[in-house]
Image (spheres, helix red, strand yellow):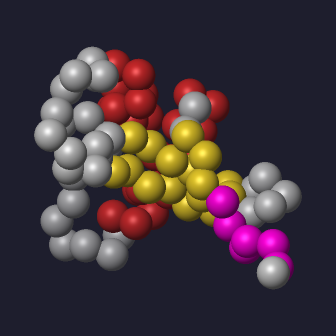
Amino acid sequence: MGTEPYCLRPATEDDLAFIADLYQQGCWRSLVSCLRDEAIWRYELIGKSKDNVNRSDLRVIETPEGEAVGFLAHPPTRGER
């Protein structure tokens, strides 16, 4: 078995500038997009209550060497009740 080409890790406040920049780059592909600056991503990461059903977990995609190459924002649950 080989080494995985990428891994996921929980995002931290240190990742927010990267996330905001990458998100902004992705917005150029769409005619309509939501404005999200670093402050909005900070609120998403640490400002919302753990009980907030509209909260997203943020993960950073990185190479085995630790270079960030992408991110994911996903619901914190897997649909269990």
Q: Quadrant of residue 12?
A: top right
Residue 10 visible in image: yes
Instruction: State the residue at coordinates (73%, 71%).
Output: 4
Q: On the rendered structure, is 38 left or right of 18?
A: left
Q: Position of residue 72 (x, y in %)?
A: 44, 55
The residue lying furthest to the front in this view is 81
User: As drawn, is 61 to the left or to the right of 41?
Assistant: right
Taking the spot 21% from the left edge, 45% from the top edge, the residue there is 80
Q: Nearer the viewer, residue 43 or 77?
A: 77
| Magenta span contains residue 80 | no
Q: Which residues are magenta?
A: 2-7
Quadrant that contains the C terminus: top left
Q: Residue at x 34, y 25 (%)?
A: 43
Figure quadrant of the N terminus? bottom right
Check the image and report above or below for 29 versus 47. below
Q: In the rendered image of this protein, does residue 75 appear above or below residue 42? A: below
Residue closer to the observer: 43 or 79: 79
| Depicted 42 relative to depicted 11: above or below | above
Where residue 55 appears, as percent x and y from the top left, is 26, 35
Which one is nearer the viewer's eye here, 42 or 6?
6
Where in the figure is residue 62, as x and y percent of width and height?
Answer: 68, 58
Chief secondary structure of the magenta span?
loop
User: Does 59 sit left or right of 44 as displayed?
Assistant: right
